[in-house]
Amino acid sequence: MACNVRVQAKAENEGGCMEKVLAMILAGGRGRRMDILCHERPKPALPFAGRFRIIDFSLSNCAHSEINSVVVLADYQGASMANYLRRWCFTNASPDSFHILQPKSGYYIATADAVYQNLDFLHRYGAEVVLILAGDHVYRMDYRKMLAFHKQVKADVTMGVVSVPIEQAHRFGVATIDAKGKVLDFVEKPRIPRGNLASMGIYVFNRRVLLERLIEDAAQPDSTHDFGYTIIPGMVNRDKVFAYKFDGYWQDIGTIDAYYEANMGLTRQPPLFNLDGAWPILTEKNDLLLPRESQTGTVKNSFVGPSCVVKGHVENSILSPDVRVDDQAVVRDSVLMAGAHVGTHSMVEYCILDEGVSIGELCYIGVGTTPMPAKGDVTVLGKDVTVPPCTVISRNCRILPHTRPTDFITNAIPGCYRFASPSTSLYSALAKEKG
């Protein structure tokens, strides 16, 4: 499927005229660490900041960097991803090329396999340089600067890296580099990191080298077929591998905690990441009405999406379109996705409410015994959950999608609890998990 992308901002190419560049966005992952938030959607399609999807950031970076030949590799919930991308293309249309490619053989095993399964497209397109991106990161980046660096150092592959706290480095691929940026060592998710330069999952490959390494890797039956675990480590002592240091905001939305913290960072003063400015994040068209506050409603340090109705109090929170907060209801430090509803005199704190969640009257969701939750104590209610009135759900709970009022066998759900409706297929999966 092909559609077009409009470039919103023009700028001079960094380092002169760019070679022919093809961007490939990896958007096929199921996002298992995102738990119930990705039971029914791919991770790149997760709502973010009330009005975007996570993949909007990579797409927007391509548009503003004047990289208008873009391929999205979709797999898990591929039809849903494709439908969103069509809407995105319709809004941001121009004469430039955009394709969605799904697996040719069942599914994509890993990141390198996703590109390998589409070698025929790479052969037909004939780009000199291939820019490989992840579809589940939040950041603004002018890829032209990285492409210019790649050309300047005459690299075979250049990887984007960013400094992270050393205690978090084990979550990423970690690079060791010399003074010129040449990669001397690279280990994916090391148990004991030797440094804090983390891979961003962004790679600039010379096309010929990429094709050769992917074909070699595909012939190895014991390979993980992954860029981080196999391709890049194998190239370090063989090819010219360089690291491009990125000094802006970058967040890998790999876990529920990371997703929650990235959203909450927008409500801080000043915000960790500013969505406004000359590099706008492009998204699908949204003609919904502006949010409304009643005479009794108040909003503080929050993002409130179109068509929201706030009659209660909202603080330090993110509200997607069509959220309703009724009279005397309180929402604090929470993420509410589209169509969520919080009933009269109910309180929601330190929570993520997925699309279509409905909280009855006099409920307390995300309740804890301490003023501030510990890391990982976020409560998550899955898509279309309906909570009956007078229900208390503690911190660090998971209520699985489509749980109905009649499924609640108690009105007090303790912490560290996973609850699912017996009528859903997820219930049987949860039963096996417990067994």
Image (cartoon, helix red, strand yellow):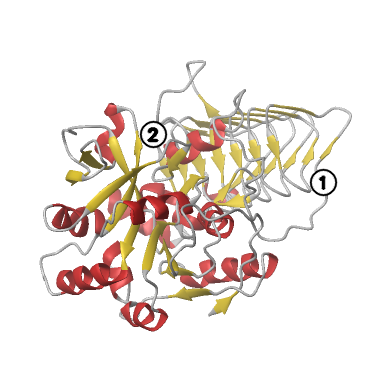
Residue 31: image location, x then y, percent:
39, 54
- Left/right placement of residue 195 relative to residue 265 reads left
Is 122 on the left-hand or right-hand side of 77? left
Q: Which element carries disc 2, helix, strand or loop?
A: loop
User: What whole-number distance in Å separates the C-alpha atoms at marks 2 and 1?
Assistant: 37 Å
Q: Secondary structure at mark 1?
A: loop
Amino acid type shown at disc 1: Leu
Q: Earlier in the sequence, mark 2 or mark 1?
A: 1
Nearest the viewer among 9 and 38 is 9
Answer yes or no: is residue 121 visible.
yes
Above or below, 299 against 372 in this view is below
> Which residue sits furthest front?
16
Q: Position of residue 215 (x, y in %)?
A: 19, 74
Q: Is residue 170 above or below residue 85?
A: above
Camera-side mark, 2 or 1: 1
x then y, percent, for residue 336: 62, 42
Quadrant of the rendered structure where residue 212 is?
A: bottom left
Q: Quadrant of residue 419?
A: top left
Mark 2: few, some, or many residues within 10 Å (few <14, many ≥20)?
few
Q: Which mark is residue 416?
A: 2
Question: Closest to the observer: 202 or 331?
Answer: 202
Q: Establish if 166 lies above or below 75.
A: above
Name the one closer to the observer, 69 or 322.
69
Q: Residue at x 61, y 72 (%)?
A: 4
Residue for point 22% across, 45% down: 182
The type of residue carrying mark 2 is Cys
Residue under circle 1? Answer: 290
Residue at horizontal 14 percent and vertical 57 percent from the top? 234
Q: Residue at position x 50%, y 55% from top?
A: 58
